[in-house]
Image: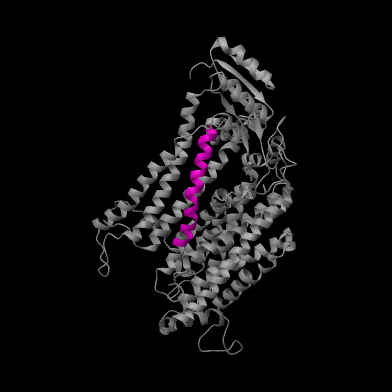
Amino acid sequence: MEKASGYDTNAGKVIIEEHLGHPGIKATTLDYAKINDEMLAMLDKPHPSYFLLLLGFLLAFGLGILSFAIQLDVGIGFSGISHPIAWGFYITNFVFWIGIGHAGTLISAVFYLTRAPWRTAIYRSAEAMTVFAVLTAGLFPLIHIGRPWLAYWLIPYPNERLLWVNFKSPLLWDVFAVTTYMSVSIMFFLLGLIPDMAILRDEAMRRGKKLKALLYTTMALAWRGTNHQWVHYMRGYLIFAAIATPLVFSVHSIVSWDFAMSSVPGWHTTIFAPYFVAGAIFSGLAMVLTVLIPIRAVFGLQDYITNHVIQSVSKVIIFTSIIVGYAYATEFFIAYYSGSPYERAIFYYRPFGEMTSWTLLGDNQISFPQIAFWLMVFCNVIVPIPLWRWKVRNNPVAVWIIAALINVGMWFERFNIIGSSLQHEYDPASWGEYWPTIVETGVTIGSFGFFFTLFTLFVKSLPPMAIMELKEGTNPPLRNSVHKETDG
Amino acid sequence: MAKFTGVWGTFEYLDETTETIEKVRNEGVQPTVISPCPRHEIDHALGNPSTILPWIALCFAALGCFIGFSLPAWTASDWVLPVSGKPIVAIPPFTVIGFELTILFTAIHTLAGIALLGIIDSFRFPIPRGAKRYPRFQRDRFGIVVRCDEEKLEQFETILKKHGAEEVHIEK
């Protein structure tokens, strides 16, 4: 992001003027070789504590597999979902993980188009997070349907049943939206990796590691870094960013229409698409900070992921927190203003429980949606408020605690939407209670184990930061031309 | 691949690289430049080369959009599922599928286009084996590859050396 940067034919030299945007990294203390070597050093043999951490995540993942195996054996009835609450923890997890997957594309595509240079150091990890989160999310509809071996019925192909899928159903839109998002995220991730694979290939060749060299040569797609390749690559990257931007907003909008297209009280609202998208960005960025702040501390990456980067992400979190808080308030106002007794009832039920009791201190028992509601409000509206202060944003530990709580709050927000409306629909005769069973809890823990296992493996097997873009973000080596340096 | 005849050199500094590019272009030869990261300065010195990739992306976006609308329209007509007198072929719900397949087709073919155009360019603008094996181009060095006739080898070797090349190699 330089002003008037380029080769001046008249002057016969390179002119680089001051940066318009903050580069995020400490550009004044880094050079190409240093960036290269430090990033490659991150892939060296890990400390034993790494394996301990990995084991912990694998155990959590194993618990999820065991729980799912029990459900497969016994049947979907072993979960807590039953009439009238057909959507419980599994769909909550699906929506939550899809939301987490929004941050990567937001950072790599939207912030690329809006020229936010502080994204450089964090976008690779955020993109990896997107891929892993969407993979995790994609498992949940399969787990939820009870008979996952029939999931291929969702694919439109000529079949012996002489049926086609119903393209007018939001659930099928979801199939297309999520698979497209997963495919584009994986391709975007792999595209960004190509130049870095060439770096790893050359390093493996230099060290005489033939197997690694062969693997990286394949992944580098004959990359040499010629100007011809760069022209195609950079234009292709721009196209990817341009198409991924509407995609990232569309995916969670479509997920929200799974609910909004129905006539269930609390779901059937036009605010759902922007509300879900804002929530997705909010939770995704919180997860980025939850993951990257410890990585920054462990690997000593303060020159790359500077406090400026954490501050910038925190500012977007504040912004989305306001949108989410406003959406909560709007939902309540519209429920009141609509005059619909069913809408009013569900929005009373969410914070205060049963309609029969008008006091918090009566015989009214606490229900799961009540816990979800108050945790949601506390974690998503109250907890981010300290981020308005510069001192808090500049303190990575404080930011990490806030980000972790936001993750908790966003999970419960998803449950608040999904679980409560189905418990209290129109007819009191069909009202019901939902509490998750041990199987659903196990699968939920397993999903976190799956996500963090993949991410932990990624950190030590692929460059967690885009080496090429870090080099692009630092000051280039110049012998004669002078550039005005920027403070990192 | 055709035998390479020409000169290639390595550079530590960006400004020396761009100066050399200009001198080489003044001699009527378009060099191939290797760099560890993309730099606008190199593009400017090379005369801002372009790519047909956006046209590939656009064509496949149109194809994806067409399939995205026609597949649901055809399947809805093949297996008619009337609901409350609503249109059988309905544009608003099919827009979602149209949009998603537009994006998907664009992404797949943009990635394929980058790979394919890169392969085509490796034949159109070959670089010598020595330059391919030079280990620092991906790390911290710039490279200029000049493809020329044997009688001009010495001339380009002089230009590269004069403008700060660390190493200059002649390939015959």
Residue A487 relative to residue B146: left or right: right
The N terminus of chain A sits in image quarter: top right
Q: Which residues are magenta?
A: A229-254
* Residue A225 image offset from top left, x and y in percent: 58, 31
Residue sitting at 43 percent across and 65 percent down?
Answer: A257
**Residue A286 visible to the viewer:** no
Q: Nearer the viewer, residue A59 or A70?
A: A59
Q: Nearer the viewer, residue A139 or B170?
A: B170
Give the answer, above or below, for where A31 lies relative to A449: above
Q: Is residue A230 left or right of residue B78?
A: right
Does A202 appear above or below A253?
above
Asked if A8 appears above or below A121 in the picture, the reply is: above
Is A31 situated left or right of A278 in this image?
A: right
In reply to whether residue A257 is colored magenta, the answer given is no
Q: Is residue A251 magenta?
A: yes
Q: Does residue A404 show up?
A: yes
Instruction: Identify the main secondary structure in magenta.
Output: helix
Residue A347 lies, in percent from the top left, at 50, 79
Judging from the image, the colouring scheme is: one colour
When asked about the image quadrant of residue B153, the answer is: top right
Q: Nearer the viewer, residue A82 or B103?
A: B103
Q: Quadrant of residue A402?
A: bottom right
* A96 vs A35, nearest the viewer: A35
User: How many dots with numbers?
Assistant: 0
User: Vertically, is A332 above or below A280?
Assistant: below
